[in-house]
Amino acid sequence: MTFSVGAGLPLAAVALSPPGRIVPIVSAASILFLAVLGALGGRTGGASIWKSVARVTVWGALALAATAGVGALFGVAA
């Protein structure tokens, strides 16, 4: 369930973004959604919310950056 929600939120940001601003808006929204879902996961699991937010957000942002880097390397990044 959380995987589907996590995928749906950035897709909603894509649908609501003006064409010339999709990349920065979706990037910012994705990081915000990672933080929110990290907090939700931490609270649900009984863990520290701040540690959960930090862990999910930092690792998620690194994954986003790595994906963008590979896309740029192969010339397929936006």
Image: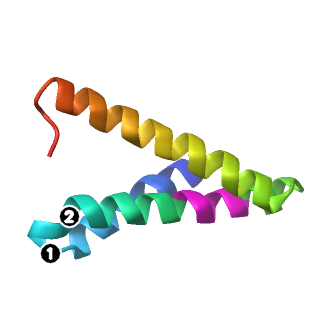
Amino acid tagged 2: Ile
The span picked out in magenta is: 34-40
x%, y% of residue 49?
Answer: 79, 61
Residue labelled with disc 1: 18
Q: Nearer the viewer, residue 5 or 63?
A: 63
Residue labelled with disc 2: 22
Dot 1 falls on a residue whose secondary structure is loop
Circle 2 crowding by C-alpha within 10 Å: few under 14, some 14–19, many from 20? some
> Left of 26 or right of it: where is 45?
right
Q: Is residue 70 visible in the rendered structure shown here?
A: yes
> Left of 45 or right of it: where is 17?
left
38 part of magenta stretch:
yes
Circle 1 crowding by C-alpha within 10 Å: few under 14, some 14–19, many from 20? few
- Which residue is located at x 15 percent, y 23 percent? 74
Dot 2 falls on a residue whose secondary structure is helix
| In this view, 60 is above or below 22 | above
| Contact (Cβ within 8 Å) of mark 2 with mark 1 | yes
Q: Can you tell which quarter of the image residue 39 is in?
A: bottom right
> Left of 42 or right of it: where is 58?
left
| In this view, 51 is above or below 26 | above
x%, y% of residue 73?
Answer: 19, 25
Amino acid tagged 1: Pro
Q: CA distance from mark 2 to mark 1?
A: 6 Å
Q: Can you tell which quarter of the image residue 10 is in?
A: bottom left
- Which residue is located at x 63 percent, y 48 percent? 56
x%, y% of residue 6?
Answer: 49, 55
x%, y% of residue 15?
Answer: 22, 69
